[in-house]
Amino acid sequence: MDSLTRRQFLKLSATTLASSSLALMGFSPATALAEVRQYKLMRTTEVRNTCTYCSVGCGILMYALGDNAKNAKASIIHIEGDPDHPVNRGTLCPKGASLLDIIHSDARLKFPEYRAPGSDKWVPISWNDAFDRIAELIKADRDANFIQRSDEGKLVNRWVTTGFLAASAASNEAGYLTHKVVRSLGMLAFDNQARV
């Protein structure tokens, strides 16, 4: 730059001014457009859900690709935080961000299992069998341990041998209904893990 003379500087300035003036008068090259590609989640089905890890109850968006009706097995391909959820507002912790790995894990349980007393093996059972077994055990324990009257003869209607831990990600309405059902059974030990 030290060897630039006054005459060369004026020529360079005039050339720059002329080329920028031509561009302003419409002689510029056409606008370059980027290639338009389809966004990878455009063809997916979006489902809102709640993270299963802890009791915070963060909202997640799950995206599935495929349709079982068209012989293409549906599979979840992407999970992200739900920006409209009041708890996490679109953010996820590292455990919540790794939910996709858990969903596709071979070790994930997809049905209830039962282990008989004294057995070392878990046996898969249907959901109906699991619900029936839970109901039978609850009824048997309540019938055996229900206290209708206290030692003083007061009506107490309580069941103290079983407790209930409510869902952490349940809504207020679900929590209210759960509370009413548990209390109507006479259960005293009732807690809710919710932090929302």
Image (cartoon, rainbow, N blue to C red):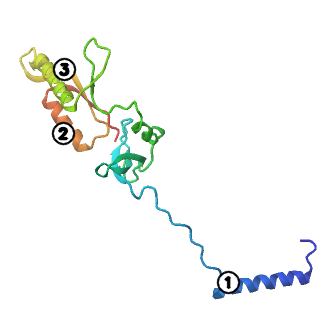
Name the residue: 42% across, 47% down: 77
As measured in the structure, the alpha-carbon distance from the residue carrying label 3 to the one carrying label 1 is 86 Å
Q: Residues within 10 Å of mark 1 (few under 14, many from 20)?
A: few
Is 156 placed above or below 4 here? above
* x and y percentages locating residue 45 in the rendered image: 35, 53
Residue 134 position by quadrant: top left
For label 3, the SS is strand
Name the amino acid, label 2.
Leu
Q: Which mark is residue 23?
A: 1
Q: Which residue is mark 3?
A: 160
Q: Which mark is residue 177?
A: 2
Name the residue: 13% across, 28% down: 185
* x and y percentages locating residue 70 in the rendered image: 31, 52
Tell me which numbered mark, 2 or 1, is placed earlier along the sequence: 1
In the depicted view, which residue is nearer to us: 156 or 19?
Answer: 19
Tell me which numbered mark, 3 or 1, is placed earlier along the sequence: 1
Residue 137 position by quadrant: top left
